[in-house]
């Protein structure tokens, strides 16, 4: 059985992938490190919004941050693991969507029968 600490960490990690802005940040950082201001411009959200989401990703252990004066450059802590997890999530989402569609179609057939 997993310890409470492990479960808490798993929840934080999986929750980090539950927001479109955070996913956009991860996808951008897959191309390499980036400053907060550049991230904000790239993903089309204000710097305050991006900074908050970066904090969540960093707390989940997905990012590392390098300080240079007032500038902060973010990068994926483990790019391979993060991108593998993102791909697994994409595959799972596609499977869930197909299953949900089949279920709706079956319900409609049963309703129309």
Image (cartoon, grey):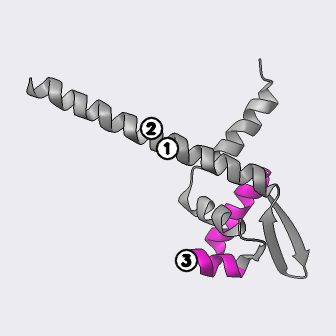
Residue 36 quadrant: bottom right
Residue 112 is situated, as x and y percent measured from the top left of the image, at: 9, 28
Give the side of residue 99 with respect to residue 92, left or right.
Answer: left
Q: Nearer the viewer, residue 59 or 79?
A: 79
Q: Regarding mark 3 in the picture, which secondary structure is present there?
A: loop
**What residue appears at the point 90 percent right and 82 percent down from the top-left corner?**
69
Q: Which residue is mark 3?
A: 44
Residue 28 quadrant: bottom right
Residue 62 is situated, as x and y percent measured from the top left of the image, at: 77, 54
Give the side of residue 93 with respect to residue 98, left or right.
Answer: right
Q: What is the C-alpha distance between the residues marked 2 and 1?
A: 5 Å
Range shown magenta: 37-62
Give the side of residue 81 with respect to residue 14, left or right.
Answer: right
Which of the labelled discs sits on residue 93, or is there none? 1
Any part of residue 46 in sight: no
Dot 3 or dot 1: first in sequence order is 3
CB contact under 8 Å: marks 3 and 1: no
Dot 3 or dot 2: first in sequence order is 3
Q: How many marks?
A: 3
Residue 51 quadrant: bottom right
Q: What is the C-alpha distance between the residues marked 3 and 2?
A: 29 Å
Q: Residues within 10 Å of mark 1 (few under 14, many from 20)?
A: few
Q: Residue furthest left?
A: 113
Q: Regarding mark 1 in the picture, which secondary structure is present there?
A: helix
Q: Is residue 7 above or below residue 15?
A: above
**What residue appears at the point 80 percent right and 51 percent down from the top-left corner?**
61
Any part of residue 106 in sight: yes
**What residue appears at the point 69 percent right and 54 percent down from the top-left corner?**
83
CB contact under 8 Å: marks 2 and 1: yes
Q: Residues within 10 Å of mark 3 (few under 14, many from 20)?
A: few
Q: Which residue is mark 2?
A: 96
């Amino acid at each position: 059985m997993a310890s409470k600490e492990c479960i808490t960490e798993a929840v934080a990690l999986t929750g980090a992938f539950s927001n479109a802005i955070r996913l956009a940040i991860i996808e951008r950082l897959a191309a390499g490190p980036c400053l907060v201001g550049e991230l904000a411009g790239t993903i089309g959200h204000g710097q305050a919004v991006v900074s908050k989401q970066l904090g969540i990703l960093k707390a989940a252990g997905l990012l590392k941050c390098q300080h240079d004066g007032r500038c902060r450059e973010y990068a994926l802590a483990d790019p391979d693991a993060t991108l593998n997890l993102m791909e697994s999530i994409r595959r799972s989402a596609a499977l869930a969507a197909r299953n949900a569609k089949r279920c709706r179609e079956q319900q409609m057939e049963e309703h129309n029968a």
